[in-house]
Structure formats: C-alpha cells, structure tokens
Image: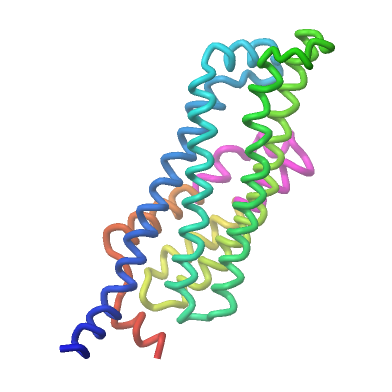
Amino acid sequence: MTDHTANNSITTSPQAYARIGGLLGLIIVVAGIFAEAFVRGKLIVSGDAAATASNILASEQLFRIGFAGELLMLCSDIGIAVILYVLLKPVNRNLALLAMSFRLVMAAISGVNALNHIAVLSILGGANYLTVFGAEQLQALAMLSLKVHTYGYHISLVFFGFHVLVLGYLIFRSGYLPKIIGLMLVIASFGYLTNSFATILNLGFAKLLFPWILLPAFVAELSLTLWLLVMGVNVPRWNAGRA
C-alpha cells in the first residue's frame, strides 16, 4: 500500500507542476496584456506629456490596477521559473538552472523597474515638496519616468530572451513536451533579443519591427501555457529522464 502511494505521488507530481505552471502562465499573459494594452497603451500619449498626465490623473485607479497587475505578473514569473526548472532538470540540470536564473533576474529587474510606473502618481500627486516645480515640469518628469520604465522593460526582456532560448532548447530535447513548442520558443527568443537591442541601439528601427517581431513570442508562450494547462507532460518519459 505504501509503495503504491509513493509511486502514485511520483506519477502525478509532474502533472501537478505542469497544471500550476500553465495557470501561472495564463496569469502572466492576461496581466501583461492588461497592463500594457489597457492601461499604459490607453493612458500614455506618445510625445505629449500634458495629455498623458491628464489621462493618468483622470484614471488614477486604473493606473494603480495596472501596477498591481504588473506585480502579480512578476510573482507568477518567479513561481513558473521554479516550476519549469523542476520539470526540465531531467533534461539537463545545469541548463535548467541557467534558464531559471535568467527568468529570476528578469523578474528582479522588472520589480525595481515597476517603481518608475508608480512613481508617476507621486510626481503628479501635488505634494507640498513638489511645489518648487511648475506644472509643465512635473508633467515632463512624469513622462520621463514612464520612458525610463519602457527602457527598463526592454532591459529585462534581454534576460527573458535568453531564458526563452534555453527553455526552448530544453523542451526540444526533453521528449516529454512537444518539440514544435521548443522550436517556436527558440525562434521567439531571437524576436525578444532583436526587439530589445533595437530599442536600445536604434529606436527608429525598433518602431518598424514592433509589434510584428514579438508575434512569434506571443504564439509560442501561449502555446506552452495552454499545453501545460491542458495536456501537461508525458509522465513515463519524464520519469525515465529522472532515472
């Protein structure tokens, strides 16, 4: 009886990890799209600090919800980084550890960078210690904070791009997750890296690439998320890899 219970625990464990990983991945996708498209994308007017400040002050609660969604996404990133390490260490423990490390560094950078998002409310909040600045100066400072947030985001995606590259390789080699998803992730990693380095080195060129350069990444990550959530891993092959 004890042996059967132990074997059953081993059998169901990777599937439990996969389901939780898929759920966390879904949270990341939903929270990320909401924060970027329905908060910053709706409120920020490119090149117009006054209009941006006006939009944010008129929708302060939405702006705060976007910040909360970003934090939820980062917490989910930490969880899925560990889960993917557990699922993929039978392929190559050192590479699985490397992939996890890249994602954790990304989450750490993004967590610090999130301060540039919420700082906008303090800059525009009308505190007494800010009266030395004029309205236009405060609006410009708020826009600068949002611009720094954008660059911080792209810096974090450099680390995420390398995470996705190693992750794709491990999945392709695993034998218990679809090779096509691994290949899609490898392709997606070059999209992330190209987009981030183009933004840092040549913003005009980056604008020509965006958003099409990241479309393969969206498809690849969503595919992995849904596969983990619905199908999980091939348990016998996962167990064979652990032997």
- Of residues 184 and 8, the one nearer the viewer is 8
- Along the horizontal axis of the image, is 106 left or right of 78? right
Decide: is 25 above or below 136.
Answer: below
Q: Nearer the viewer, residue 177 or 113?
A: 113
The quarter holding residue 58 reads top right
Question: For the magenta stretch, what is the residue range?
Answer: 192-216
| Vertical arrangement, residue 115 with respect to residue 49, above or below | below
Q: How many marks?
A: 0
Question: Is the stretch drawn in magenta largely helix, strand or loop?
Answer: helix
- Frontmost residue, 214 versus 119: 119
Farthest top residue in view: 135
Q: Position of residue 23 (x, y in %)?
A: 35, 53
Q: Residue furthest front?
A: 128
* Horizontal and vertical percent position of residue 79: 47, 58
Residue at image point 67% right, 22% down: 122
Quadrant location of residue 11?
bottom left
> Residue 144: percent from the left, percent from the top?
75, 26
Q: Tell me residue 229's x, y (percent).
A: 31, 57
